[in-house]
Image (cartoon, rainbow, N blue to C red):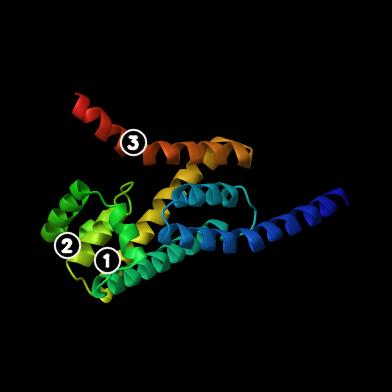
Amino acid sequence: MTILAATATVVPTESTQQAIGYPSLFLLVLIGALVPIVPTGALVSSAAVVAFHQTAPFSLALVFVTASTAAFLGDATLYWLGRRGMRSRNGSRWLEAIRSRAPEERLAQAQEKLADHGVAVLVLSRLVPAGRLPVMLACLLAKWPMRRFARGNFPACLAWAVTYQLIGILGGSLFDEPWEGVVAAVALTLVISAAPSVWRRVRPAR
């Protein structure tokens, strides 16, 4: 009876977490793709930690599908809005938002690499912190059609979701308590995100 009672207590808890967690993850990643102030990588890693500690089957697979789908739809929507801004005489606030987060130096590098390597640069751009928007702007300036961008962005979102999910699985496997794994995964994600900007500041000083 004790085991049955414990099971009855655990199952609704996990069901509630899933019912709330997956839609929340989808929405936050989607918003983060449109307005890049939400730490979407940390969200995916945290969700992977929680899923790692759950007993329900396919929890990690659902995190992967939810995160990659939301990232792809968010990127596609932002690119579509950017294309509308490029065609408009006065531009748009979405295009301006992309430009504001793509410094001239990073944009020039993205354009050069895009011209040399094409879709491969788009795939890698999501794995490089702060690399997504300069490459997206380079695609807009190169007048890539929506279909070509989507074809390259799809594997990029898959690779991005796998990478941050693996960070979460690593954090979850190191600690028995989910919250400890979440803290570890978020800390590692923030270090990875901050590393390029720190390196750019240190390099000129050297």
Farthest-out residue, top: 206
Q: Nearer the viewer, residue 203 or 167?
A: 203
Question: What residue is shown with label 2?
Answer: 118
Q: Nearer the viewer, residue 48 or 203?
A: 203
The first of marks 3 and 1 along the sequence is 1
Element under disc 3: helix
Q: Give neighbour class at mark 3: few <14, some 14-19, many 20+ (Cα, 10 Å).
A: few
User: Would residue 64 be seen by someone viewing this image from the given angle?
Assistant: no
- At which x and y percent is residue 37? 44, 51
Q: Which of 62 and 95 is in front in this view?
A: 95
The first of marks 1 and 2 along the sequence is 2
- Decide: is 143 above or below 185: below
- Does the CB distance between marks 1 and 2 fall below 8 Å? yes
Q: In which quarter of the image is residue 192?
A: top left
Q: Give neighbour class at mark 2: few <14, some 14-19, many 20+ (Cα, 10 Å).
A: some
Question: What residue is shown with label 1?
Answer: 152
- At which x and y percent is residue 68? 43, 62
Three-letter amino acid code at the position of disc 2: Gly
Q: In this view, does 203 lie to the left or right of 69?
A: left
- At which x and y percent is residue 150? 30, 70
Residue drawn at x 29%, y 50% as measured from the top left:
131
Question: What residue is shown with label 3?
Answer: 195
Q: Which of 129 and 94 is in front in this view?
A: 94
Judge depth for marks 3 and 1 and give the one in front.
3
Which label is found at residue 126? none
Q: Is residue 111 left or right of residue 23?
A: left
Element under disc 1: helix
Element under disc 2: loop
Real-space Cα separation, disc 1 to disc 2, in angstroms: 9 Å
Real-space Cα separation, disc 3 to disc 2, in angstroms: 26 Å
Three-letter amino acid code at the position of disc 1: Gly
